Every structure is written in C-alpha cells, then in structure tokens.
Amino acid sequence: MSHFVICRICKQRFDTEKESATVVGARSYYHTKCYNEWRGAKNDPQATQSADFWYEAMIDYLYRDVRLENMDFQKILSQWNNFLKTKKYTPKGIYFAIKYFYDVEHGDKIKSLGGIGIVPSIYTRSAEYWVNRENQKAGTLEEIIKQIQQRETRPIKEIIKASKKPKQVKWDLNSI
C-alpha cells in the first residue's frame, strides 16, 4: 500500500514504499540521502544555508540528540522568529548557541520549559567558543600541512637487508 509523504529538506513528494525514507519523530519524513547530507552539513560551522535549514537542524538536534521531552513547537517557532527580528541573531548563530549550551555547557533540559529562551544569555559566549574552535582547527590544519611538506622534502634512506642464509640443522641420529 502506498504511503506518500513530503521530504522536509527537498520538499518533494515521495512514496515510502518505493524509496528509502528516514522518519524523525512522529510525522517528519526525509529521503534517506537528503537526511544524511543534511546531517553532515548541519555540524559544519562554515556552512551557509537557509534559515529553514537551520531551524530544521535545531528542531532535529533538540528532538534526537538532546531528547528534549517537553518541546513546545509553537513556543520555539515564536522565540526563533523573535530572535531573528528583534535581536538580529542569525539562524546559524541560534542553532550553534543551542548546540553550545547543551554540548559544551551541559545545560539542564528541564529548565528549558520546552523552548529556546536561553539563547540571548549565551549567544555571545557561544559565538566566541565557535570562533576559537575554528581558529584552533585552522592552526592544527596548517601544522599538518607543514608536516606533510617536511616529510616530502626529507631525504630518503635506502636500507638494504642482507639476505639470510637458511640455518643448517644438524641431525643427530643417536638422539632419534
């Protein structure tokens, strides 16, 4: 029996009986390929995506990774829109602020009251953390590149192993 749904990423209608699907929550369907690409992109601080992308990423993160039990979707959407309009926060900034709060500061999910109201108080700390992390990563990457270049320019030593002669076993017939 056909079950037609709409992928939340590419917005195309598809049949879950004929194509592979990933289900998040009760009614969130994705093409498996779309979902895997999306999960990879949402953890990249340098990714540039739409506001809808970051909102979906935040909802997925709160639902699957944090396991926020009392999620109030209306409240989260209202707070999201408020932060974008009045606070002039970026969608990516809000997502990474939430990620920072739960992953780095180990925030209490019970105190969230089903929303994302913590964002204004942690937004600047979060931004500093992610910038520092990216700078450290860039420094590490530069060091790795230098090490690779040094390896390529160092002289190659040839080691010639002498061939071993097979051991001659002396048999004593009296011991047999």
Image: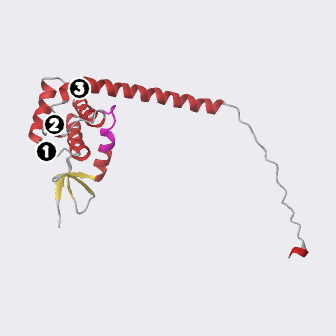
Q: Nearer the viewer, mark 3 or mark 1?
A: 1
Mark before the other along the chain sequence, 2 or 1: 1
Residue nearer the viewer, 87 or 152: 87
Amino acid type of disc 2?
A: Ser
Q: Is residue 44 visible?
A: yes
Q: Nearer the viewer, mark 3 or mark 2?
A: 2
Q: Residue 103, how many percent across, how many down?
A: 29, 37
Question: From mark 3 to mark 2, how far is it between C-alphas?
Answer: 15 Å
Image coords of residue 131 (percent x, y): 34, 25
- Report the magenta residues as a range: 39-47
User: According to the image, label 3 marks what residue?
Assistant: 123
Q: Is residue 78 above or below residue 6?
A: above
Front in this rendered view, residue 46 or 119: 119
Residue in view at x 52 percent, y 28 percent: 143
Binning the other alpha carbons within 10 Å of mark 2 as few (below 14), some (14 to 19) or many (20 upward) gives: some
Work out which quarter of the rendered image holds the C terminus and state it: bottom right
Q: Is 157 placed left or right of 133 in the picture?
A: right
Left or right side of 5 for 130? right
x%, y% of residue 69?
16, 46
| Mark 1, secondary structure of its residue | loop
Which amino acid, by three-letter code, is at mark 3? Tyr
Q: Which mark is residue 115?
A: none
State the separation of the CA atoms marked 2 and 1: 9 Å
**Residue 112 disc label:** 2
Disc 1 marks a residue whose amino acid type is: Asn
